[in-house]
Amino acid sequence: MLGKKDIEIRGARQNNLKNIDVNIPRDKITVITGVSGSGKSSLAFDIVYGEGQRRFLDSLPTFSRSRIAQIKKPAVDFVFGLSPVIAIEQKRGLVNPRSTVGTMTDIYDYMRLLYGAVGTVKCPYCDEKFDIKTSGQIVEGVLSLPKGTKVEFLTPVSKLYGETYKYLFDEIRQKGYNNLIVDGKRVDISEEINIDEYCDHDIKVVIDRFEVKSNIEKSITNSLETALEVIGEHVLIGEIISEDVPQDIKDKFYSSFGCSKHHITMANIESQYFAFNNISSACRTCGGIGTSKKADPRLMIVNHDKSINQGAFDPSVYNPKVKMTYKHIIMYNLSKHYNFSLDIPFSQLSDYVKDILFYGTKGEKITIETPPNYNKRNWIIGRTIQFSGYVNQTEHWYRETTRKDKVNKAVLDWFKKKMVEYTCPDCGGKKLKKQRFNILINDKDIHELCWMQLTELYDFMDGLEFSEDKKHIAEPIVQEIKKRVSLLIETGLDYLSLGRRADTISGGEAQRIRLASQISSGLMGMIYILDEPSIGLHARDSKKVIKILNKLRDIGNTVIVVEHDIETIENADNIVEIGPGPGIHGGEIVEIGSIDKIKKSKGSITGRYLCGKEMIPIPKKRRKGNGNKLTILGARENNLKNIDIEIPLGVLTCISGVSGSGKSTLVNEIIYKKLKSINDPRIIPGEHGDLEGYEHINDIINIDQSPIGKNSRSNPATYIGLFNSIRRLFTKTDKSIEKDYTISNFSFNSKNSGRCEHCKGEGKIVTKLQFMPDVEVVCPICKGMRYKKEILDIKYNGKNIYEVLNMSVEEATDFFKDKKNIHHKLNIMNQLGLGYLKLGQPSTTLSGGEAQRIKLASELGKIKRGKNNLYILDEPTTGLHISDIKKLLNCLKLFVEKGHSLLVIEHNLEVLKVADYIIDLGPEGGKNGGYVVAKGTPEQVKEATESITGKFLKKVL
């Protein structure tokens, strides 16, 4: 019997699906489309993926199932014809700051393997190169020396960034080593060592000294391997200290050992040596993140017009009003020694004095005297000390705190308020300890390769040649790296680099990275479900994703894509349109079949746009703005090429360009952060010369796609600010007044108030079971209504508080039509196409696009309060059907008509064609981007010969 040709779904009732039956052909590309909220994701992810995953987990042995979170059965009668299912979603969840493109794709693991296996060592003191040794080769070389030869092993060490040499010596002592050579002089670590803290010193630890004789192989090996691991970071210096050994024997030993001039070698290097997720390899200052925190003097002063004694400093740094402590004694002695007053405004102190307060006495010692009227004895009085300064003290406390296993949250919050994030001063953002960068392949260290653009990395790997003895190890690794890199390039991610942090890439980019990883696995017979893979892609690059989808299908897989992109829909083998409307108006099959069938269908909204019966109109004239402009000078962060840009205010401005051309860097890293940093010095904007014209902007609001809340208690009503108004209405009813109820009685968050205490206002009881999914049971006390019975007895216009929260936005708009403030906000949500959402719908169930539109509605709801705001939106068309884009554009028009400015990062041609002004970056992504290739109205941009966006605009204008 042949396998089924279709995936047959019977009786799907998940969320808003109305008991539908649908067949999806296997080994074909099926696009599921329809308006936002129609039930596309419910069908693709909840039904097909959910049921596929559940059945796969059911087939696992009991032991495996006990370690995996189980999946709840979706609301469907049956799904026939399923095979293993892989969902490639955009949701990134919490991203580890150490995660990079390289670690996400496993390419970095292969890079580590390559460097550990065939890397060449460059002497840190000169440019001589030599091969990595094993401890066995080193011992063999030592034993080849004449018997009686005395040999000494040493390893170079350096102090930890920001710490003292005493800290370094304590560490060495704890590891059991006592003898050092400091600047050529031998010292014993058990004695006090006088050393200038403000100079760099050449320090070597003496690991072992022995005489060459028979039967010492084992002891040398043990000594060597312990030292390499414990203290030497795999770097070793070997010195022959016998004077009677002939020079030719010494030369032969040193040349085979490593660097013939400095007698240094590196041994026992494995792939873990280059892992920044490994504590023994990660930079000790930043812990492998590449960024660290430094104290900022600006955050330590609360009032420059007050004197130190009046409270110029933040009280947590220096509080003059508390009982006298050692801090007050030091401050008194500093003022006396450096002759400055503690009673004049801080702003009047000299820069020299401020520098001492923040950065210390820089080695100069002061003898501590007793302040006047101080009768007690304090441990610090009579001592001669150096003062390190409040900035250095804070940074020292921060490093000490973060090295501990358990860190107090309140302490970390304090550090956040007093410190700013910046590139790690120790590793320079490279994440690894510095010894790792002495190992090269073709004169490049691993960090340099990780920051090559993927196209450059591919060419570099393609040009590598290895000696005969290394070929058999290196070539399979190089081929695997090339295969994976070429797939990333094919998916349109050629502008990325392996070192790019995972938390800086968009949801669409993350999805395409996972897509490339799936193709590299070469599996067949699978079902792949993708959530809008075209997101974040320029119109030019959509074809690349379509090509990848075809490749997945052609090797024998079924591909199901939830998508709104016209080009992807046109290239599908089969289209399923769900609708006709959102929420309760959706959940039905509108049409199913080929592109021609969809175009001819009378009920298909998508079809009407595809065949041109409906469209988004081009404005008859472009707005000119209010005459003011925002000017960015010398923008040079990431790949921006020192560009100057003028953004007209009072209009809708779009920043366009191919993926990776520098749009997000310009808008989010420079413009947004610079404007926010004016009031918050903790925010560090991207590199640029200056920003002019910000005085024309009243406020800056970034409406992004981050969730509106982190738990099931947060919902659209609380975010928009409706819930308080609704609760207030309930408190004004006769029954509420009689029972003296307040607004908190109608909250499901307030303890011991109106919420059901059995379920703590959740409306459900969750029971965790082993081997089975968590069981959610409707609370038996409140029956899922979240509130106590006496609260539910209070009714406003015939509805209790639970029934109001259970209304859709559309129903609530009508219900509250006589309440102007509530009706206004609900009406805006309705206009934005969010009429299908329930007021009390948990925010955890909302998509990124829905969250962004709720934020838009929130801002539109309070738009009357001011003028001249700058609103930033990053791809607001994410997750929107073309009919919803039309609604979105009508709302964006309202912002401009009220006197505000809009700055939108966008690829969608429907948005670009209605913009008043476009700034097109490019011409390509990555290193070949970062220039302004066109600017002006859409009509002007379409005529620019260099603009790729312009070529596509010609088709829609």
Image: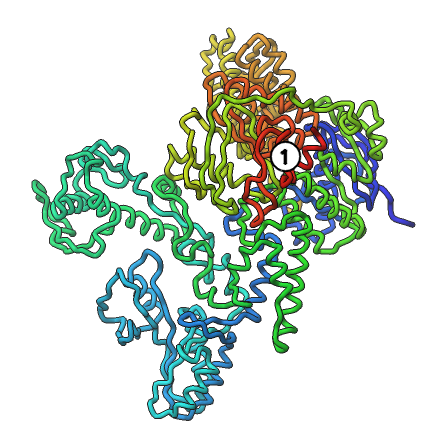
Q: Nearer the viewer, residue 258 or 144?
A: 258
Q: Is residue 285 above or below residue 752?
A: below
Q: Position of residue 442 (x, y in %)?
A: 55, 68
The residue where tag 1 is placed is 776
Q: Is residue 285 left or right of residue 806?
A: left
Does the image show residue 758?
A: no
Instruction: Write the residue at 10% across / 49% down.
Output: 369
Instruction: Write the residue at 50% across / 73% down.
Output: 268
Q: Which amino acid does label 1 sit on?
A: Glu
Instruction: Write the residue at 49% across / 11% down.
Output: 736
Q: Where is residue 683 in the image (x, y as percent from the top left)?
A: 41, 39
Q: Nearer the viewer, residue 769 or 59?
A: 59
**Number of marks drawn:** 1
Number of residues whose C-alpha sits closer than 10 Å to that of mark 1, classed few (under 14), some (14–19) or many (20 or more): few
- Occupied quadrant, residue 460: bottom right
Q: Which of 86 and 763 is in front in this view?
A: 86
Q: In this view, does 738 lie to the left or right of 774?
A: left
- What quarter of the picture does the C terminus occupy? top right
Q: In this view, does 7 lie to the left or right of 347?
A: right
Q: Is mark 1 on a helix, strand or loop?
A: strand
Q: In this view, does 416 lie above or below 472?
A: above
Q: Where is residue 506 in the image (x, y as percent from the top left)?
A: 58, 42
